[in-house]
Image: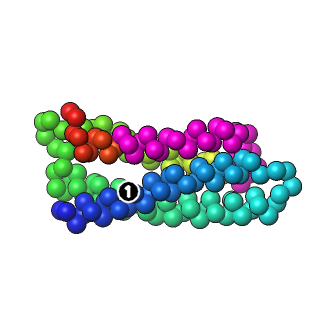
Amino acid sequence: MLLVKSFHIVFVASWFAGLFYLPRIFVNLAMVPEGSIAERARLLLMARKLLRFMTLIAVPALGLGIWLWAGYGIGWGPGNGWMHAKLAVVLLAMGYHHACGRILKKFEANAMARSHVWFRWFNEMPVLMLVAAVILVVLKPF
């Protein structure tokens, strides 16, 4: 079980690294001046590759988490309300990941109207999700 838990942590940390960095690329994309075709193309390529990598990393992160939950029974039974809250955070992270994919498609279609300031705030959400998940798992407050 400890090996499964270790790999789960590694894959979650890697997935969140992508969730931290992709919106930073969006900040830069939102700041690209008109006519900077090469810069825009390079940032879009970076974003596409990162999103693909993040998605591949998210699969084992989620799969190993399900294994710990369903296979080893972590979070089952009374006194494990923290797990329900953590699963809600995981769903939020998956939704954020999906939203990043939709945003990238809008950038590719040149249809994104949000400013770099909006993306700077958007970039803070995964930090809050990771803090919440770690606190829930370590402290098990309820």
**Amino acid type, residue under disc 1 in the picture:** Val
x 47%, y 56%: residue: 17
Q: Quadrant of residue 128?
A: top left
Res 66 quadrant in image: bottom left
Quadrant for residue 119, please give it.
Answer: top right
Residue 83 visible: no
Q: In the rendered image of this protein, does residue 126 appear above or below residue 79?
A: below
Work out which quarter of the rendered image holds the C terminus and state it: top left
Which portion, as a residue range, is magenta?
A: 106-132
Query: Residue visible at 13% across and 36% down?
Result: 78
> Is 95 left or right of 50, judged from the image as shown?
left
- Which residue sits at x=22%, y=35%? 141
Q: Position of residue 60 (x, y in %)?
A: 36, 62
Closest to the observer, 108 or 38: 38
Q: In the picture provided, is 4 more to the left or to the right than 14? A: left
Circle 1 Cα neighbour tier, 10 Å, few/some/many (<14 / 14–19 / ≥20) = many
Q: Position of residue 56 (x, y in %)?
A: 46, 64
Horizontal placement of 75 versus 121: left or right? left
Q: Is residue 74 magenta?
A: no
Residue 139 visible to the viewer: yes
Which quadrant of the rendered structure holds the N terminus? Answer: bottom left
Q: Main secondary structure of the magenta part?
A: helix
